Amino acid sequence: MTTIALLPGDGIGAEILDGPISYLRQLAREGAPIELTGPWPYGTTGWLQTGSTLPAETIAACRDADVILSGAVGTHPGVTADECPNPEAALIELRHLFDLRISVRTVRVPGGEDVVIVRNITGGAYAGPDRRVESDGLNEAEDRIVLNPARIQEVFDIAVEHARTHPGRRVMSVDKASVYATSRLWRRISRATAAATGLAIDDVNVDRAAYELVKSDELPAVIVTEGLFGDILSDIVCARAGSPALCGSATVNPDRDFGGGATALFEPAHGSSPHRTGSRRSNPTGAWLALADLLEWCPDLVTLGLHRAVRGALDRVLDAGAPTYDLGRAGETTLDLDEFNERVLEALATVTA
């Protein structure tokens, strides 16, 4: 049995999960080994309900779960940043509580092939407060970046797994070895991984990588890089794809210790978009991509092939040509959130029949 804790979060977070949750509930009714819990308070909406962006009940629910499915965390209609500052800290705390230390983002590129960005999401530039010195505006501020060789190797191991599923396509390791000692370590491990696996890995400085991602006709299959570089480059890839909504995100514990609390958190990579909350116009592609990754991650579910069914249905809808507002041209007929979900669910009924 796979237990999934639902954390819709803020803004469009709840509505963006409607389609994937409907499908999960349907699977559970049909006998799939799935248990859903929640929704649990989280982010700004958690603060509204309990006074905390990450209440104790939500942490307990994640400890009882195998994985987390999240909508978005951030600003929420009617709540100012002064009232609830930094709700994103709830997500960061979850990563540290459950050691979800590697990020895997999947960008669906219309008319092209997926791009997967693998990076460390804790450590490095995303260090804890013990490696930061805040400034009062007069004294210096400091952010200390430390990378551990074993932790870098974990990132490369997952990147290699993804690269194996895209034979013949480019794998790009991104660093700034001309400047940073941490990048020179990164490049050393990149070359050792290439030698050990026989996989061709291109080592590229981050500024050159940004240029190539904008300029080159063909995007790489996999980008493997340090956390901050990956955060920026994944947005460039989304821009090439056409929308931040075309990205699903997973933050995982590579130890995969099922039965000991949440092993991964899955979510669309976009923000909470408070100005669009309730419009039912948002593009839910990222949520469906996150669901596909969740279904592939969980050992009770991967053997059922549900992840392939979700990707097949999603691709069928995206390739049919009727876009959501963010992908449409001026004057073009577009799908709203509910119409898009209906088409994916209809396609799933066909795929799984």
Image: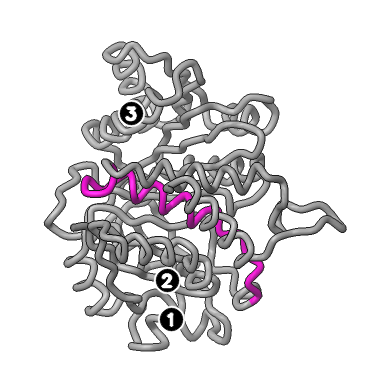
Q: CA distance from mark 3 to mark 2?
A: 30 Å
What amino acid is labelled 2 in the image?
Pro
* Residue 281 forms part of the magenta stretch: yes
Q: Residues within 10 Å of mark 2 (few under 14, many from 20)?
A: many
**Rendered image quadrant of residue 163:** top left
Image height of 338 relative to 79, above or below: above
Query: Which residue has dot 1 on it?
Result: 45
Upstream in sequence: badge 3 or badge 2:
2
Instruction: Give the residue drawn at x 37%, y 15%.
Output: 199
* Residue 26 forms part of the magenta stretch: no
- Coloration of the structure image: one colour
What amino acid is labelled 3 in the image?
Glu
Secondary structure beneath dot 3 equals helix
Query: Which residue has dot 3 on it?
Result: 161
The label shown at residue 60 is none
Image height of 205 relative to 263, above or below: above
Which residue is the extreme one toward the left?
Answer: 259
What amino acid is labelled 1 in the image?
Thr
